[in-house]
Image: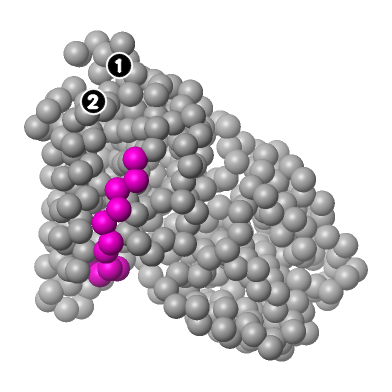
Amino acid sequence: MNNNIVILIGFFPDPRFVNRIRTEKQAGSVNLICWDKGYSKLPRPKEDGYKLYIITEKAKGDPIRRFLPYKLFASKAMKLLKQIAPLVIHVQNLDMLQIAVCYKKRYNLQTKIIYEVADLHTLVIDEQRTLIRKAAQKYLINKEKKYSCFYDRLVLTSEAFYTKYFHNIVSEDRVVIMPNMPDLSLLDGYVAKDHNADFTVGFIGGIRYKDQIRNLIEAGEATGIKVLLAGYEEGSDEIEQLCKNKPWVEWIGRFNFKERGAELYGKCDAMYAVYNADMENVRVALPNKLYEAAWCEIPLFVAKNTYLAELVDEWGTGIAVDHKSSADLINEINNLRNDRERYNKIVEHCREKKKTIDYHYYEDRLLNAVRDLMNEAKIQQ
């Protein structure tokens, strides 16, 4: 009996999709189809209880130059899908959804599709000012609506994605909320830092919003604290170069979270998750640092006027700062470092919140959704 699941993504699997693979292996035979564009800084995947298909088509970052490579990738992915004949296809992003829908319409209408959205693209969610970008936005939104009748479950990493955007596209009963919550068992080896040593604020994760990282580096110098930066830097290596000859900054760069996550969190007194809140997708997104910092019982700096700031304020687990102002960050770092009572109060709130942070609760929700879809597909075939 066919028990095949395909995970179809346009990149090497990040930690979130490594977790998705691990979850879905419990429901059936997982086949990962991913796109090697020739510039990924994520580690090349290795088969681990699933079948791996890497399609190599070099592609540049901008959509126009990526059009032909995408067509070549789509053609090869379609052949693999036809060969595997999956009951369920799990995709992320609209370009991969298009391939899955094409396969479903052409070869098997009973195939079930799970569509995952980890971020709302700025072109979709932000106000566009030029005619070209407005036309592109209208095209993408219409495409979202057109394809919505072909997928069976919509996986979102933030509830705000639904209230802000998808509530006009998909009924709530088809939505599975999967917070960007890592498997916190990876932090089992965590040992809290000696807070009497040099105060350290860390950033752990992909380095994308570089103005905000510059603010942290500047604040580190102004306050005399240590700054730890760990994660792969997207695009150019300007932040890595900026860190050279700055003794208050420890640059780690790319690392394996499973191997070093607990160690790196154990070097920090506070965590930094301030992104460019001028972007609407940033204002509604939830990073995994929200949960990791609470689990490690350390305060989290976040950007004001975001859904993340609302939660941090509600939970009492961190401090919101102006994402454009290093002066505001400097002030709040000094306050947190010098006010031990305030620091300990935030730690206590983290300790209370970690009791409710359970990755396995959400993992079970996804697993049950996959199993239900597989059973439906088997009955219909």
Q: Is residue 368 above or below residue 359?
A: above
Mark 1 secondary-structure assignment: loop
Identity of the residue drawn at 11% across and 32% down? 105
Return the disc, 2 or 1, that comes first in the chain's sequence.
Answer: 1
Q: Which residues are magenta?
A: 53-63
Q: Amino acid at mark 2?
A: Ala
Identity of the residue drawn at 17% across and 68% down? 64
Crowding around mark 1 (Cα neighbors within 10 Å: few <14, some 14 to 19, many 20+) is few
Residue 4 in the magenta stretch? The answer is no
Query: Which residue in the protein does label 1 denote?
Result: 2
Identity of the residue drawn at 52% across and 56% down? 287
Residue 171 drawn at (x, y percent): 27, 36
Residue 56 in the magenta stretch? The answer is yes
What is the quadrant of residue 224 in the picture? bottom right
Q: Is residue 55 above or below residue 271?
A: above
238 lies left or right of 4: right
101 lies left or right of 235: left
Crowding around mark 2 (Cα neighbors within 10 Å: few <14, some 14 to 19, many 20+) is some
Query: Which residue in the protein does label 2 denote?
Result: 85
Whole-Å distance between the Cαs marked 2 and 1? Answer: 8 Å
Residue 9 drawn at (x, y percent): 33, 46
Q: Is residue 263 visible?
A: yes
- Mark 2 and mark 1 in contact? Answer it, CB < 8 Å: yes
What is the quadrant of residue 339 in the picture? bottom right
174 lies left or right of 237: left
State which quarter of the image contains the N terminus. Answer: top left
Q: Amino acid at mark 1?
A: Asn
What is the quadrant of residue 36 in the picture? bottom left
Q: Is residue 172 visible?
A: no
Identity of the residue drawn at 30% across and 16% down? 2
Residue 310 drawn at (x, y percent): 54, 59
